[in-house]
Image (tube, grey):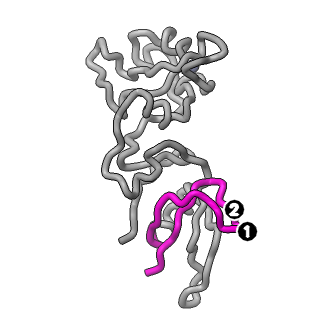
Amino acid sequence: MAIVKVYNKGYDRSTGIGELLHTTTVRHAMGMIRRRVAEPADLVLVDDEIVPVVLELTREISGAWIEGGQRTSVGFSFLAVHERDHWTCAYCGRGVSKRPRCDELLATVDHILPSSRGGESSWLNLVSSCKGCNNRKADRTPEEAGMQLRFDPFDPMVSYRVGGHVEQIFVAA
Ligand SMILES: [Zn+2]
């Protein structure tokens, strides 16, 4: 069975230069196209059927875990949570930083279920948040605070999120 190469967004179709994330099967590639996680960047004709051989993600993903196809785990840290969330506040969508231009945009990590109420420090309970939103939310859940998560946290060990889809990393044998 043909192997499909999956590139990060930014793949250059004319030169074939890009960031190779992993390879997958044609069947899985078709699913990724259907879910709009990726677009075909190169197609070939196999047995009268047009099949993709190169895919480009529809949204760029970044961070150490994108090499996940070769990894079995990603070290958990608050820094890694910011990396996963692209240094973006999960509540207001503004960019956060360790050295922000204003104090409000200081990068903090928010426990979705507050730690004072048993919320764990884990991939699924933590999101990147600006200091302003974190202070506003305080010891409340997002619902109680009337705040909405712009994206859901996920465990980068097993998946990456592209355009609203959690994509399992699936490496063809
Ligand atoms: Zn914010």
Looking at the rendered image, the quarter that the N terminus falls into is: bottom left
Q: Image point 73% across, 68% down: which residue?
A: 14
Magenta range is 1-27
Looking at the rendered image, the quarter that the C terminus falls into is: bottom left
Q: Image point 55% across, 30% down: which residue?
A: 87
Q: Image point 43% across, 34% down: which residue?
A: 80
Q: Image point 30% across, 12% down: which residue?
A: 116
Where is residue 155? Give x, y as percent: 37, 41
Where is residue 114? Give x, y as percent: 35, 16
Q: Amino acid at mark 2?
A: Asp
Does the CB distance between marks 1 and 2 fall below 8 Å? yes
Can residue 36 be seen here?
no
Q: Which residue position is annotated with label 1? A: 14
Residue 13 versus residue 150: which sits nearer the camera?
13
Magenta span contains residue 26: yes
Q: Residue furthest left?
A: 118
Magenta span contains residue 60: no
Q: Which residue position is annotated with label 2? A: 12
Image quarter of residue 34? bottom right
**Is 164 placed above or below 105 here?**
below
Q: Few, some or many C-alpha atoms within 10 Å of disc 1 (few <14, some 14-19, many ≥20)? A: few
Where is residue 35? Give x, y as percent: 53, 57
Where is residue 26? Give x, y as percent: 48, 73
